[in-house]
Image (cartoon, rainbow, N blue to C red):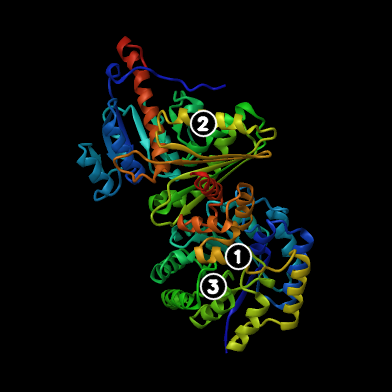
Amino acid sequence: MRSVVIHDPTLRDGQHAVRHQLGVAALRGYAEAADAAGIPVVEVGHGNGLGASSLQVGRAAVSDDEMLSTVREALRHSKMGVFMLPGWGTSDDLRKAVAHGADVIRIGVHCTETSLAERHLGLLAEQGAEAHCVLLMSHMATPAELAEHAARAVGYGARAVGIMDSAGHFLPQDVTERIGAMAEAVGPSGVPVIFHGHNNLGMAVANSVAAAEAGAGIIDGCARGFGAGAGNTQLEVVVPVLERTGFGTGIDLYALLDAAEFAERELMPAPPVTGSLSIVSGLAGVFSGFKHQVLDHSGRAGVDPRDVFFELGRRQAIAGQEDLIVDVVAELSARRAAP
Amino acid sequence: MTVAERVTAGPATVPPITVAIIGTGVIGRDLVGKVHRSTVLNCGLVAGRNPESEGLRYAAGLGCPTTAEGIDAILAAPRPYDVVFDATNAMSHAEHWRLLQPLDTLLIDLTPSRVGRMVVPTVTGTRPPAERNVSLISCGGQASIPIAHALAQRFEVAYIEAVSTVAGTIAGRATRLNLDEYIATTQHALTALAGVRDTKAILNISPAVPPATFRTAVHAVVPGADPEAVRALVDDAAERVRAHQPGYEVIACTVTGDRVVVALEVTADSDVLPRYAGNLDIINSAAILVAEQHAARLAPAARTGVGR
């Protein structure tokens, strides 16, 4: 049986669904439950990672320092993961995270911008942390481009490299091609490939299985799919499905189900559903984290939020460009008012 | 209120000064083009490190003397250049400053090093400080500070955040390695020049094809913000920036409770840069303005024989 490493960003990517408002008790409780289930890596932070609490994407209820120290205390076996986008967080944030005991540090860059991670991956290699490089909005790049960028990230010192389907746009065949190309490019170096799915089109679990079959060694999943819009790959589903497919995870099923129940009860008002806007954002190739702001602005202006998502897709808005929402809503509103 | 100093001497009355440019990336290349267009700046030397670089070829094609000997060639000039533009990177700038400091040269820094006196033309004026090192801060700083400053002149601004997006195709290696410096320098400048203690800077590099136009969103927490007053302040500030940066446009300006969001886009007007590269154009246009006004200030001194 081959094995895959399960990486759990419930306490980081899930923050997008609750406007980055997870409190200390929720962080601690879930981290303890995930640790008890034997989940290898538990990631925590603001939805956009270290240093990202802002008006642009939303301010976090709890500081980075407090989030990291809370989860560190709660984990006995699991590694603690964090995430950082260069241009949002800095080297100082990385040094603080290492000092807080972060074991796995992911540097996120948009799909073809790997060189933005060069300096921070180098710093993490010096610090001895396990550095990953993840390519966001990966549907905007071809399999060959992603393979080239994966190889570059390994050259910069990444000890795992992968893609996020930030918009939940992929179908399984897309994932097979991309992960296959990346695994071929970095396979000889022994560096595992990561797949991080979103469920906008109901494909997250199927895409994750396709990724594992194409050679991914690290699969991301969130309890109850906790994440923006339709949410992420549902952790307590993907783990047993991977096991049945023939990939060992080392995770205890009942404890995993308990952790997911805790998450549903304590982290979220309701589990994610694949609503109209999630479907539209998946089709349009737009990050689901835009949903709350799209609803707020289009509600005030009286425009159809579905049109807003398609227009954002046409403009190739990337995660982090939430400021475009205001323009798009204003433009659609003006267009409608014109005779 | 700080009023930008206006030097009114026209080209006819200003004898040209001689400038050098170090760095032949896209910023350096655009500076070469802008110096070439200027009637008061003579291109004395363009210094790079790779004799085969596209930047040196471009400069030579415009008739500028070039060298692959970098800063050493600038130091070896028989008479110091009146102005040296540093278009290298933040790490190299400190060393360039150390070497040029003893000379009678105005150093204009295009890197986010935070070494020299920070200049945003419509906010600080363009007069160089006695120590002759001027920092142009960052593209996001040049775009956001006029707006932040205008808001802070009229209202108590509790917080300012500047979020910029630049196209990946125009972000060179130095920019990519200097993101931490970009953030620190832009935040520091927002505090120093707009007087708002709590500031944040964010930079997105976009892989979009066709490339995204340079854009900066200024988010502010402004208790008591009045939408009409905010709009008027923003329009006025933008109008003044357009005097040296014609492609500076207010795309959106919204006030919701105490939250103000001003979205700006800047397009380039350049022989070298594509239109979407307003990030480089805004910082280079400010640099050229500083150099031209420096030339105008030197002019009467030259005529009356007063030492500089």
List x then y, in percent, for residue B249.
46, 37
Q: Is residue A308 above or below residue B272?
A: below
Q: Amino acid at mark 2?
A: Asp
Count all numbered tags in the image, as a single digit. Answer: 3
Q: Amino acid at mark 3?
A: Phe
Q: Is residue B228 above or below residue A171?
A: above
Which residue bears the numbered disc 2? B235
Q: Residues within 10 Å of mark 3 (few under 14, many from 20)?
A: many
List x then y, in percent, for residue B193.
56, 31
Q: Are marks 3 and 1 on the same chain?
A: yes
| B91 or A283, nearer to the observer | A283
- Chain of the residue that carries numbered disc 1 in the rendered image: A
Q: Are marks 2 and 1 on the same chain?
A: no
Residue B297 in the figure: left or right of residue A302: left
For marks 3 and 1 on the same chain, the one whose residue lies earlier in the sequence: 3
Q: Do residues under tags 3 and 1 come within 8 Å of each other at their CB atoms?
A: no
Which residue bears the numbered disc 3? A195
Work out which quarter of the rendered image holds the C terminus of chain B and state it: top left
- Chain of the residue that carries numbered disc 2 in the rendered image: B
Work out which quarter of the rendered image holds the N terminus of chain B and state it: top right
